[in-house]
Image (cartoon, coloured by chain):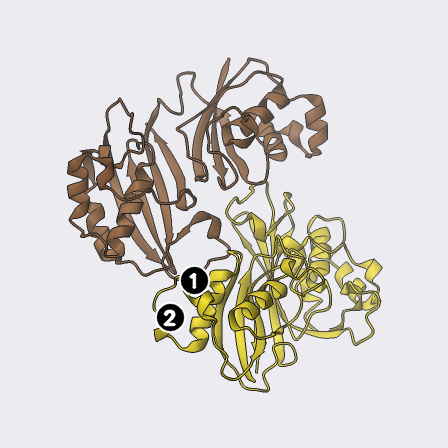
Chain colours: A yellow, B brown
Amino acid sequence: MKNYRMLIQYEGTRYNGWQRQGNTQNTIQGRLESVLSRLTGAEVQIQGSGRTDAGVHALGQTANVLLPEGWHISGEALRGSGLPGLDDLPGCEALRRVMNHYLPEDIDVTELEEAPERFHSRLSAAGKTYQYRIGIDDYKNIEGRQFRYRVGRPLDVEAMGEALGALRGTHDFAAFCGNPRMKKSTVRTISAAELEEVSHEIRLRITGNGFLQNMVRIIVGTLIEIGLGSRPVSDMKRILDSRDRSQAGPAAPAGGLCLLRVYYD
Amino acid sequence: MKNYRMLIQYEGTRYNGWQRQGNTQNTIQGRLESVLSRLTGAEVQIQGSGRTDAGVHALGQTANVLLPEGWHISGEALRGSGLPGLDDLPGCEALRRVMNHYLPEDIDVTELEEAPERFHSRLSAAGKTYQYRIGIDDYKNIEGRQFRYRVGRPLDVEAMGEALGALRGTHDFAAFCGNPRMKKSTVRTISAAELEEVSHEIRLRITGNGFLQNMVRIIVGTLIEIGLGSRPVSDMKRILDSRDRSQAGPAAPAGGLCLLRVYYD
């Protein structure tokens, strides 16, 4: 078998998240696997760096897949794509283009290349960066609306930024974990976390060695309550220390969240 | 009656264009009129600066509407919106916010203000700028895909830019008019027309004192043929001089087109 690494972008709005489930057609992983199986005739399993929830987007999801030695794109699929010049491309670049042709317009494989045998998109991942976009006034931002959550009210960015500071470093993030039956460690390291105010919105970028289920969305939900003034800045540290999910705010809506990048050593 | 000027943004993808038709619910004008009627209890007619076709977007459509003196927002609609602080706002700013609350997320009234009685969004318009975005490689641009047309092949931007030059100035644009039964003058003045290459795409911006039906899309369809090398640069001038629609290329898809701005003296 040969191992391949893929970089994938998607708008998650109409999908039940990354992970394949019963109805494979409605997940990103399911869509990718079904197209890749059809093209190569091989049974494939695509391994993502992690699940993204229903409605969450990605501009840099990373995945890997094992293909049998000597795989090739079915002649029918190749002809059906009508894409010119594929013969002149390396096999995996041709495969990437034909995949994209058969994938829907809201899923894009932007890179596909051979990877070392030991490369595993989830287990080899050293960290990730997520972005959350919050609309702060009544501007709907027609062009980017699927990628942000519009609170529609002014937020105290300074207070939010100060609260965010409490999360940097290594902590037990149990209070920000959406899975009440989480048995493994809930300790994670946040190496960077910044808020930026751009026109009509606030953008949070947060980088860590790993994220618990719904972690970014619960952080954002809590930050929004602080930004609205319904919680004091000091609450963030108190919540963190409590390790109690019920102390934190609600998970902010999925549509504002985007997986920007996965890091490997 | 009092006259109001509105600035409107919309993603046209799921609408049958600007102009109200039998089924009012599925046009931008129809949506705006139905919300405004419901809010004020008045029979309203919203006058746009011009029609946009099914699937065409706008970031700066301008319209005007006459409301009876002493109009007010229905108490039920006001309470139903749950918007805070409306009492402190000028009447038309409150109306704008409540309208946006009841309008779908792909239509946004970004400005609403009193206008002189004689202001008419179509008859007073001195010019318009349209933008057309063409995707030139296989990058799907997940975030902006509804606003561009992906050719997916490299285009000769220099040739396209040269061809575009033939259109600047005052000409009879009959060859670029989608309405074969056009009885009025097909002479228009293009005051500015530029192509810009940005990452993964080419953007055309074109400003004129008026545009014929499908004019920008037929110009773009012809430019793409020139960019692909299937027509010589000199064709643009020849087509223009022919005044014959059958000489020009096909109308490029609606989704790449966006009305950016309408100018008034």
Amino acid tagged 1: Ser
Q: Are marks 2 and 1 in contact (CB under 8 Å)?
A: yes
Q: CA distance from mark 2 to mark 1?
A: 10 Å
- The residue sitting at 40% across, 46% down in the picture is B256
- The residue sitting at 26% across, 58% down in the picture is B156
Graded by Cα atoms within 10 Å as few (under 14), some (14 to 19) or many (20 or more), the crowding at tag 1 reads some
The image quadrant of residue B171 is: top left
Find numbered disc 2 in the image and state the secondary structure of the residue it sits on: helix
Q: Position of residue A58 (x, y in %)?
A: 57, 62
Chain of the residue where label 2 is placed in the rendered structure: A
The image quadrant of residue A246 is: bottom right
Q: Which mark is residue A210?
A: none
Work out whether B128 lies above or below A7: above
Work out whether A42 lies above or below B31: below
Residue under label 2, please give it. Answer: A86
Find numbered disc 1 in the image and state the secondary structure of the residue it sits on: helix
* Front residue of B242 and A261: B242
Q: Position of residue A134 (x, y in %)?
A: 61, 52
- The residue sitting at 28% across, 31% down in the picture is B209
Sequence order check, earlier mark of 2 and 1: 1
* Front residue of B175 and B29: B175
Chain of the residue where label 1 is placed in the rendered structure: A
Looking at this view, name the residue that lies furthest to the front.
A76
Quadrant position of the N terminus of chain A in the picture = bottom right
* Front residue of B157 and A130: B157
Q: Position of residue B200 (x, y in %)?
A: 39, 60
Residue under label 1, please give it. Answer: A81
* Front residue of B114 and B194: B194
Pointers 2 and 1 within a single chain: yes
Q: Position of residue B63 (x, y in %)?
A: 45, 27
Quadrant position of the C terminus of chain A in the picture = bottom right
